[in-house]
Amino acid sequence: MVRKVRFKCIKCGNCCRDKNTIVTITNRDTIRLVNHLKCDLKELLQKYVGFYQVRKELENRLVFPAISTFRGNAFLGLRKKDDGSCVFLKGNLCGIYEGRPMVCRSFPFVFEVKEGWLSWGLMARAENICLGLGQGKRISEKNLEILGKQVIEELEQYRKIVSAWNKQEKAEQLDPTLLVSSFLEEAKLFPSQ
């Protein structure tokens, strides 16, 4: 039986203010952000993106693969303001809505492929912070499938890039900012969405 969920973003900003949530980003997200912000990689890294260290005990629970760095495993994520909110939050609205990362585009849903089938659920913290759950129309299976396929495709490509990076980094102790540079090289193959 398919679970029916009502959801409509009511622009409360709770997901963007949650101190315990870090918006992880993929290579395509990096491309989206550079294109949307009309900035270069250096500015993106200095102002908007950070490397967050991964605690060893949590690594197996991450959806995004950990990036091997000379300081330990980490992941890329949007920076936060001093109050814990997203650096792009303006009032209750996203300041980069058209260029927002895939995690934000798919919130409050998560997707995975189990035994060849696309499955979905709600992000672990969504029911505690998302006031839009239970609001609006029921989300159709078709819309969830379209979104889920996009998420899975992007995540799989990201996993391949990170896997190749991690193998090379272990051998050479590479600077992690070079990884983000390699994301931008993908821009020609995967234009921003």
Image (tube, helix red, strand yellow):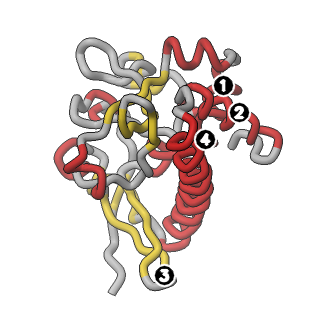
Q: Are marks 1 and 2 in contact (CB under 8 Å)?
A: yes
Between label 1 and label 2, give the one nearer the viewer. 2
Q: Position of residue 12 (x, y in %)?
A: 31, 32
**Point 66% across, 37% down: residue:** 183
Between label 4 and label 1, give the one nearer the viewer. 4
Q: Are marks 1 and 3 in contact (CB under 8 Å)?
A: no
Which quarter of the rendered picture does the C terminus lie within?
A: top right
Per the image, the residue denoted by label 2 is 184
Find the distance from the CA under tag 1 to the CA under tag 2: 9 Å
**Point 60% across, 51% down: residue:** 164
Q: In the shown orientation, is residue 158 left or right of residue 91?
A: right
* Mark 1 / mark 2, whichever is N-terminal: 1
* Mark 2 / mark 4, whichever is N-terminal: 4
Per the image, the residue denoted by label 1 is 34
Secondary structure at numbered mark 2: helix
Q: Are marks 4 and 1 in contact (CB under 8 Å)?
A: no
Find the distance from the CA under tag 4 to the CA under tag 1: 11 Å
Per the image, the residue denoted by label 4 is 27
Which quarter of the rendered picture does the N terminus lie within?
A: bottom left
Tag 4: amino acid: Asn
Q: Position of residue 66 (x, y in %)?
A: 41, 46
Tag 3: amino acid: Trp
146 above or below 85? below
Find the distance from the CA under tag 3 to the CA under tag 2: 31 Å
Mark 1 residue crowding within 10 angstroms, few (<14) / some (14–19) / many (20+):
many
Mark 2 residue crowding within 10 angstroms, few (<14) / some (14–19) / many (20+):
many
53 above or below 189? above
Per the image, the residue denoted by label 3 is 117
Find the distance from the CA under tag 1 to the CA under tag 3: 33 Å
* Mark 1 / mark 3, whichever is N-terminal: 1
* Mark 3 / mark 4, whichever is N-terminal: 4
